[in-house]
Amino acid sequence: MSILVLYGSQREESNAKKLTQAVLEGIPHHAIDLRDCTILPINDHRHTPGGFLPVDDDYDTVIQEVLRHDILIFSLPIYWYGIPGRMKNFVDRWSVSLRDSRFDFKEIMRRKTAYVIAVGGDNPRVKGLPLIQQFQYIFDFVGMTFGGYIIGQANRPGEIEKDLRALAEAEQLNRILGQTGEA
Amino acid sequence: MSILVLYGSQREESNAKKLTQAVLEGIPHHAIDLRDCTILPINDHRHTPGGFLPVDDDYDTVIQEVLRHDILIFSLPIYWYGIPGRMKNFVDRWSVSLRDSRFDFKEIMRRKTAYVIAVGGDNPRVKGLPLIQQFQYIFDFVGMTFGGYIIGQANRPGEIEKDLRALAEAEQLNRILGQTGEA
Amino acid sequence: MSILVLYGSQREESNAKKLTQAVLEGIPHHAIDLRDCTILPINDHRHTPGGFLPVDDDYDTVIQEVLRHDILIFSLPIYWYGIPGRMKNFVDRWSVSLRDSRFDFKEIMRRKTAYVIAVGGDNPRVKGLPLIQQFQYIFDFVGMTFGGYIIGQANRPGEIEKDLRALAEAEQLNRILGQTGEA
Amino acid sequence: MSILVLYGSQREESNAKKLTQAVLEGIPHHAIDLRDCTILPINDHRHTPGGFLPVDDDYDTVIQEVLRHDILIFSLPIYWYGIPGRMKNFVDRWSVSLRDSRFDFKEIMRRKTAYVIAVGGDNPRVKGLPLIQQFQYIFDFVGMTFGGYIIGQANRPGEIEKDLRALAEAEQLNRILGQTGEA
């Protein structure tokens, strides 16, 4: 089982990243930081004759990497109570991959398990719940298993270290993921 | 009372736009289509010495227009069960405006009323509810009144015309907005 | 198509009932007011040897009536942001019907369509959304189609008449239900 | 700080109760099992001349006990995706206490902190989220602090012992509550 983390943080010192690193301590994994990628908003040509046009950015590289792994971890700040635009642009583009003739997107995705690690500053364990529900709908749509989520509370850089509950959950998930092994 | 619509659709023939036009029939208003703007994802420098750096895109033009109006209408497709990345990038950047010394962002925003007109294809009146909850949190954060929302069901271009319930709600909202008048 | 309304209001002059009557104007239907019934809380004997014990109240009469109809309308106040206890006790008892050897509960329920008409006083179009999500899960569990819902805003008796949006939606639903006819 | 647990389980061997006992291990507390009480559904006389009539059941005894404590723990199964009817009847009756002239209900409640410990069998960490949102609205309404929640996954009696994540969270909460001490 190989693991890919998608980091969707908007800043360098990210609490979501720190919490994710606690989850993955000692576990081999790959990671992509979306801040290092250019992923443009989708232009929806589902119903245009000719369909989607090629887009010159990093989407294809990232999605090819996604397709190669068994476990996906979405690591993100809860930004304005939702998925940050940068990461949402990536998910929105799945509409293109659903129509990509090179692979059967749903067929590949439905064999994967996804986890969400989200950190917010404003009562995230309640105000972050719509975001969790959305991820469930997203994963359901492509048939992917939603393995679980951790919501952490933090605002200033490093503050996640005070959220003992989130850290305890990270330890728990670390144990589970550690047992699945790495191919 | 002057009205500004923010169109967040990802395609030219948008059901959300059609539904919004039914809401605004005969009512003077301004509109910005985010597809005509470049709005980059935020790089969060809230906690970086020096703070946010100037960004060379259309965000400032759009937010200045937002600040000038009394009523904001967010018109958007429900995309992967959430706000499209293009529009989310715009909202994410409010974190910069909150720290803009040229104006008191919250003080201006809290005098406005916002409406949401969202159209989705997959059981949107249930699966679109997390998105509505997020908008409530967003508006609460800046103190803006959430005047109401309409959720329409449509997928292919033009299909919104069959959603008689959404059209009845649009007519209702048209009457309400028509009475508020235009300054 | 025969229609059964379950009234879950906690008082005589109910805004939810008034809104429901607007939905059903001119449409033949049956109705049960749960205030006229005694329905005790479930004692969960799913995992007790011997299973559920007979309960001496009106549950069986009500559920037999439910099973006979094609369309169910749950008409209720949003009470403390959820289903009133009286109506919730009724739904909780479905756990008994799922194990009733006289009929195949899910098999009968999955052929029905359910509607929800809910009225609340505290920002119900947002704060009532968790209740709508719960009804979706409830209906999903027994395989019943969720035909739609109307959320009205009202507090004092009669106040629903000022909620023009809810009344417009009621008119819309009246047209739809009127066309399905009565067997 | 004195602690009161309200048990809302529908059966004797309750996973929610087991999880709650893990939370409270070694911590002095009081407990009320709502199965030992008769609490009738509310008859809403808020707008009736004469107001609410006295009801001959255990509500008053329970609410007096609630008022005496600093920390309330709602321990419940997620039943049909919501609060069990038995416990919901109790909360619904708060509408009477809000008008009780013997005490200022909100004034007393807003000084308390509430926790929710909920166990469900069908994907509770996602499908139980509307229930959590409802508790937030309930606690907000009376001004009570929502200290946190644990969602466990279990169905058959005793199964909660396999939910290591919920047990880890229980341990965490045990540490927090243990530090607050008992008056």
Image (cartoon, coloured by chain):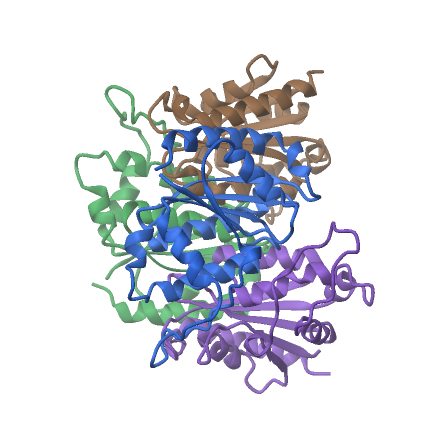
Chain colours: A green, B brown, C blue, D purple
Residue B141 in picture, x, y percent from top left: 64, 44
Residue D47 in picture, x, y percent from top left: 74, 49
D151 versus A85 height, above or below: below
Quarter of the rendering occupied by the N terminus of chain D: bottom right
Q: Nearer the viewer, residue C74 or B99?
A: C74
Q: Which residue shows up at 47% across the image and 65% down it?
A: D78
Q: Nearer the viewer, residue B56 or B98?
A: B98
How many marks overall?
0
Quarter of the rendering occupied by the C terminus of chain D: bottom right
B102 versus C81 height, above or below: above
Indicate the quadrant where residue D116 lies: bottom right
Outermost residue toward the bottom in this view = D26
Q: Nearer the viewer, residue D75 or A173?
A: D75
D15 versus C107 height, above or below: below
B153 versus D154 height, above or below: above
Q: Nearer the viewer, residue C27 or B75?
A: C27
Indicate the quadrant where residue A87 lies: top left
Residue D111 in picture, x, y percent from top left: 74, 66
Residue B108 in sight here: yes
Q: Which residue shows up at 68% across the image and 31% down it?
A: B112
Residue C90 in picture, x, y percent from top left: 48, 60
Residue A158 in sight here: no
